[in-house]
């Protein structure tokens, strides 16, 4: 889309909310004019924020990303309608052959510019903290299996979650770093020292902090405080089920650049309560909460627009909530042209009403259907 002007907007610019107009040309933001002249598309005071970047999503709109290549694409499209303009598809633990096939689907989407790549949430995770990961397919760290999956992803494997207490886990972190893959600490029963060792070896992300982790104890702070002390970005599932609002405040107290909002959404998102399947295990969704038969939470029915709006309702400043949903995860992925409505950035944006409900979504200068 060329030479488009959005006027009469409240634009969440890098320096705060600016009333004015936003000019877009050839998929990029070319100007931000405070008090800009009328004309173009009038937004009547709507808030414009950067497009959301979701580092962790398994499905949505009735589509499980591991079911087929088409389901993966359809789930991405569903979340795009809720403001997620950059997606990292997440794959639950499964046999290595199946993961390689799914990584191939993700690579095709990434080659087409539809997603940012893939996140392997497993199979090198703790049986003790596996949550909704299928325990039948968990493995101890295996460098050959990792190399196979890296090859299957054709350069598009961006993140792998690892339990650092497992035998050989630090060697796997080293291998991930060498391969240019972000090593994340998650689904772990690690001690503080074991988790810290992973960060010292180059892990740079915490997977859904607090969830799927040994909890904090005053004599054994575990991976949660190790992650916070390491200063790494920390994923959080802000659906009102996985975390108390005070937890977000605690992460923010360590620095607003550390908070990353994710969905961890499954196929039930946007569909409703009922029975579903995740990683070969039956999941029941009731009042929006997804659980296995044993009561373990099994992903969420969250979308990024709701994660953002909930954070603002819970008292997080809109600039901070926006960064957690856009700039911070974009920085994790090294995407310098995302997460900001700055001149030169890709024109990814979300138009919100006074209740922070999505009105329109633009990706790379094109309105999303």
Image: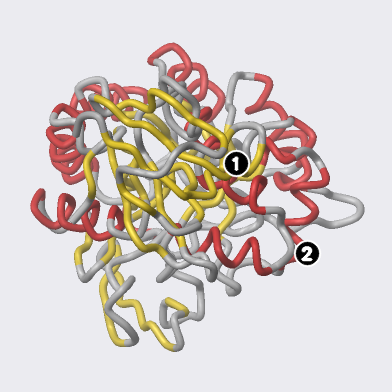
**Mark 1 and mark 2: span between their CA atoms?**
30 Å
Q: Nearer the viewer, residue 108 or 113?
A: 113
Q: Taking 154 as reference, is 282 left or right?
A: right
Considering the image in quadrants, where does the C terminus appear?
Answer: bottom left
The image quadrant of residue 240 is bottom right
SS class, disc 2:
helix
Q: Taking 53 as reference, is 69 left or right?
A: left
Residue underneath mark 2: 246
The structure residue drawn at horizontal position 76% and vertical position 47%, both measured from the top left corner, is 252
Among numbered discs 1 and 2, the one appearing first in the sequence: 1
Q: Position of residue 5 (x, y in %)?
A: 33, 38
Residue underneath mark 1: 18
Q: Position of residue 90 (x, y in %)?
A: 34, 47
Foreground disc of the pair 1, 2: 1
Q: Nearer the viewer, residue 170 or 39?
A: 39
For label 2, count other residues whose C-alpha is less than 10 Å away and answer few (under 14), some (14-19) or many (20+). Answer: few
């Amino acid at each position: 889309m060329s030479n488009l002007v959005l006027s009469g907007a409240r634009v969440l610019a890098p320096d705060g909310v600016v009333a004015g107009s936003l000019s877009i040309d050839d998929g990029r933001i070319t100007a931000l004019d405070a008090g800009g002249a009328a004309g173009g598309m009038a937004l009547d005071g709507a808030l414009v924020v950067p497009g959301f970047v979701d580092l962790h999503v398994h499905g949505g709109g009735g589509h499980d990303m591991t079911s087929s290549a088409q389901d993966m694409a359809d789930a991405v499209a569903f979340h795009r309608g809720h403001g997620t303009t950059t997606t990292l598809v997440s794959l639950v633990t499964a046999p290595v052959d199946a993961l390689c096939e799914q990584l191939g689907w993700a690579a095709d989407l990434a080659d087409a510019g539809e997603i940012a790549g893939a996140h392997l949430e497993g199979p090198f995770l703790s049986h003790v903290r596996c949550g909704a990961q299928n325990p039948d397919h968990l493995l101890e760290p295996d460098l050959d299996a990792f190399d196979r999956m890296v090859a299957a992803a054709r350069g598009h494997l961006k993140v792998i979650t690892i339990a650092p207490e497992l035998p050989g886990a630090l060697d796997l972190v080293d291998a991930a770093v060498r391969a240019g893959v972000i090593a994340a600490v998650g689904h772990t029963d690690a001690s503080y020292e074991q988790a810290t060792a992973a960060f010292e070896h180059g892990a740079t992300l915490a997977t859904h902090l607090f969830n799927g982790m040994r909890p904090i104890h005053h004599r054994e702070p575990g991976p949660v405080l190790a992650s916070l002390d390491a200063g790494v970005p920390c994923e959080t599932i802000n659906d009102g089920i996985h975390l108390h609002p005070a937890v977000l405040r605690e992460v923010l107290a360590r620095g607003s650049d550390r908070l990353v909002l994710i969905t961890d959404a499954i196929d039930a998102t946007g569909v409703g309560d009922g029975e579903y399947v995740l990683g070969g295990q039956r999941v029941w969704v009731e009042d929006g909460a997804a659980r296995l038969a044993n009561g373990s939470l099994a992903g969420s029915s969250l979308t990024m627009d709701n994660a953002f709006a909930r954070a603002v309702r819970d008292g997080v400043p809109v600039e901070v909530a926006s960064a957690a949903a856009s700039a911070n995860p974009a920085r994790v992925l090294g995407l310098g042209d995302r997460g900001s409505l700055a001149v030169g950035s890709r024109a990814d944006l979300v138009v919100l009403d006074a209740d922070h409900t999505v009105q329109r979504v633009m990706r790379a200068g094109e309105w999303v259907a």
